[in-house]
Amino acid sequence: MKINFFKTCMVVLTVAFLLNSCQLSSVRFNPIPQPPPTAKLRVYVVAITSDMPKSGFWKVSEEEFIRNMFRKTARVLRNRGVYEVVPVADIRAALGDQKIAGWEWKQNDWDLAKAVGKSLHADYVLCVERSYKLNLQQDMSLFNLHTGSQFNVSNYLPHRLAVPDAIDEMIRINYQTLFRSAQSDLLRTAINKERVKPGEKKVISAGEKGAAVQQPPRQTAALVNEKQKKEVKQPEANQLAFEKELEKALSDRDKKQDGSRVVVYDFEAAEQLRIVGLILTEALREELYKLGGFMLVNRENMAQVMEELKLQQSGLVNEKQAIKLGEWMAASEAITGNFAVLGSLSVIQAKRINIKTLGTIALGSLKCKTGSEDELLDNMPELARRLVELQQK
């Protein structure tokens, strides 16, 4: 009896394995040519709908949801200057007209999405899932296709906060939370890509085979994994934090904001370190936002003004030009800075300027040993406080 039971279990497991293998292999994707070299982080976006609710719950179809999430993600990431989203043309070249169900994408921890992402030479794959559980649920996962690192955010929209604009704010908060948790990983990937010089053995792209990916330091990877475990153990705490932030965001929309209007410009950096400088700038911007007491010009508004003036932020190396542009954005203050590698040190210098008087309000700097740039992220709250508190003394 026990032997027959054991044999039955083995048969079931074997069939399940073969079914999973067949399901993955049933989706065909063609390799595409290596895209032009870029220091930007290449992101492949997959969006799905699961756990179907009562009829009429979804305001947009699954196809429209996929298009909307692709456009929204492309806009959000493009404005940051750090990323490039894998274009639709490349995706069609790889997948053709195949219709892939949401469960196919998601099975085995998004294995199919990772496989397609590698064939598209992506550095990361971003998986977005909408579902209906207690109410509208949104789950996002970001996978590093070089190292296997994974970052997640999962929140639902409570009934008491299901008001106009709540979904847009929910998506914004989830993006911000996800990429904030992955900041250290993104920084290491950018440094890995940007420090490879022409003629040297380049870091493998996700879609290539036969070469080794430079791994993050063991200690750092262990710390990241430990942080992820803690986050998994605190779903209720994460949900409560999300609801608090959502409630504040919805409330702030109806309030007149007080304080100086401040524009934070991207750190100047050598071309090979430009993406690293952008990631560090974004980290400073987030810390300044947390401190409050003033209004920050958001990246979308900055990008819109610069597009209208036919300017690129990375070209604003002249401080007077940066200040003049701040006037166009109705800002009273500006924060400028630079990121550089000086010998064995990586250094950030930043200052806060009064746009009208051109006077310096506050100064601050951070430094670390080259190769330990995670320390700059860890100490970014201190730099933000220096730029704010020095003004208040």
Image (cartoon, rainbow, N blue to C red):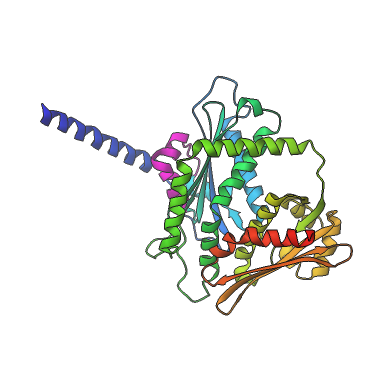
Report x, y in % for residue 129: 52, 37
Image-based side of 326 in relation to 12, left or right: right
**Residue sitting at the far front:** 393
Report x, y in % for residue 66: 58, 38
Question: Which residue does the image show at 33% across and 38% down from the upper left?
Answer: 20
The quarter in which the N terminus is drawn is: top left
In the rendered image of this protein, does residue 194 appear above or below residue 180?
Answer: below
Report x, y in % for residue 268: 69, 68
Q: Main secondary structure of the magenta part?
A: helix
Report x, y in % for residue 309: 82, 58
Question: Which residue does the image show at 55% across and 20% down from the upper left?
Answer: 54
Query: Which sits in the foreground, 283 or 23?
Result: 283
**Residue sitting at the far bottom:** 343
Image: magenta residue range: 96-119
Image-based side of 310 in relation to 163, left or right: right
In the rendered image of this protein, does residue 90 appear above or below residue 334?
Answer: above
Question: Which residue does the image show at 28% across and 39% down from the upper left?
Answer: 17
In the rendered image of this protein, does residue 158 appear above or below residue 43?
Answer: above
So how many labels did they put on this image?
0
In the rendered image of this protein, does residue 43 appear above or below residue 379?
Answer: above
Q: Is residue 363 magenta?
A: no
Image-based side of 225 in relation to 156, left or right: left
Q: Is residue 81 visible?
A: no
Q: Quadrant of residue 10?
A: top left
The quarter in which the C terminus is drawn is: bottom right
